[in-house]
Amino acid sequence: MDYFPLFHKFNGESVLVVGGGTIALRKITLIERSGANVRVVAPEIREDISRRPSCQCEYREYRETDLDGHALVICATDNTALNQEVSDAAKARGMLVNVVDSPDLCNVIFPSIVDRNPLIIGITSSGRAPVLARTVRAKLESTIPASFGHLARLASAYREKVKQVITSSSDRLRFWEKVLNGVTAEHVYAGRLDEAERSLQKTLDDPQLRVQGEVYLVGAGPGDPDLLTFKALRLMQQADVVVYDALVSDAIMDLVRRDADRIYVGKRRSAHTLPQDAINERLASLAKEGKRVLRLKGGDPFIFGRGGEEIDLLAEHQIPFQVVPGITAASGCAAYSGIPLTHRDYAQSVRFVTGHLKDGTTNLPWEDLVSTAQTLVFYMGLTGIRQICEQLIVHGRHPETPIALIQKGTTPEQHVWVGTLATMPDIVDREKPQAPTLTIVGEVVSLHAKLNWYQP
């Protein structure tokens, strides 16, 4: 570890900045947020520095005595000799010194900062790759809600009160985990601060609520982990147990909290690990044990995902739950195959249809599915592809209507077969695609050759 991360309280302390240009302005903008009093010494000082209330400006050359009485000196000049002089003098006095873009002259460096005050995160590459540190900061900025600061302040306001009510340190830890990762936090993220405080107080007042579990019904999307929502990822990181199905990719499971218990309940045609009723009961049972349960489903849980059935039982038992939508397979697979589901010239509507065969037949309103101005998307239609194509033709769809079958869409194993209603059954017999697949029927499929951008 080249540098030890240590947060310094500069509020009310004096900081000397040698230099008055653009580089100095950037450092001043950061340091003044800490409440520091900034003294700037340079022959020329930018006007937007001199106008800052936190800055006392002296238009002259630096003198060593300028170091007196300051907690930190920042040297922000392009004068190599001056930078060395300031660094040597400051270090000789045991002062903190930062020379911009010269890590060898520093004993402290500025990190890239994610500010969710009072939650502060600093990222550094030890001065070796500042752009990399900024890249990491950008990733954190996009995943940490801006309202985290409100959540931290709420926790701080209740900290002593919670200590008085909950005397056991282990019980307090569980209480704060529930508050900071549960309903109270969600109120904060949604901007409902008064409701968040009421929720926290209610949880503190009721011992039963402190140990009550919750279920997160989360859509994992079509396969590519980059297509997860921020909220889905956040809940994946805080669950005690994850109940997942066959359509959740390994890459997505790798993002689940490492020490969470994992329960596989996948279904493949007639091979069901657990029947649906048993899954519903398992979710309720785990939540009643006080666990935060992540029910992770491929695609979107409310589109052919039976998510409504699972939360119906939770509602009956008055178990708290959240539903997080995911990118459904139709949207993800179509986008990654260059097939727009609607298009002004080809399709003015889109219809999602289950192609799942029950007892060898599909019970679908075929007469409603033959309009040439709509796109059809069949989920789980691989086994019934021949019957689907035949029935569409029988009920009036032209045999030359374009059709695409997409295997493992949005993943590195994606493969797209394009044909017509007349030819696709034979293509499937010959190529033997593997589930999961999605089938798109309509004139929009003709755009695949031109718009296909994803080349795994």
Image (cartoon, rainbow, N blue to C red):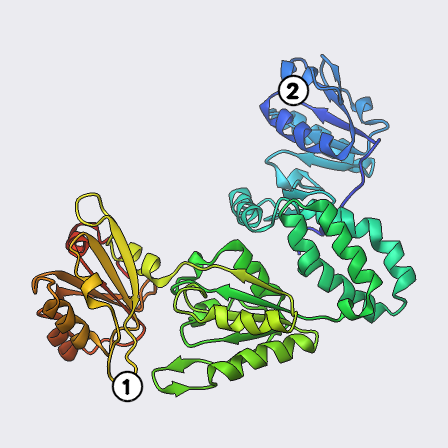
Where disc 2 sits, the SS reads: loop
In this image, 89 relative to 299: left or right? Answer: right
Q: Is mark 1 on a helix, strand or loop?
A: loop
User: Is residue 149 placed above or below 359 in the rendered structure?
Assistant: above
| Nearer the observer, 432 or 399 | 399
In whole angstroms, how far apart are the C-alphas of marks 1 and 2? Answer: 80 Å
Question: Which image quadrant for residue 11?
Answer: top right
In the foreground, 331 or 108: 331
Q: Is residue 255 left or right of residue 438?
A: right
In the rendering, which numbered label is found on residue 359? 1
Name which residue lies at 55% across and 56% down: 231
Q: What quarter of the picture does the N terminus occupy?
A: bottom right
**Comparing labels 1 and 2, the label whose residue is closer to the camera:** 1
Query: In the rendered image of this protein, does residue 93 appear above or below residue 205?
Result: above
Q: Is 271 positioned to the left or the right of 139 in the image?
A: left
Q: Can residue 341 be seen by looking at this rendering?
A: no
Image position of 427 with respect to 346: above or below: below
Q: Position of residue 451 (x, y in %)?
A: 21, 50
Q: List x then y, in percent, for residue 198.
A: 77, 52
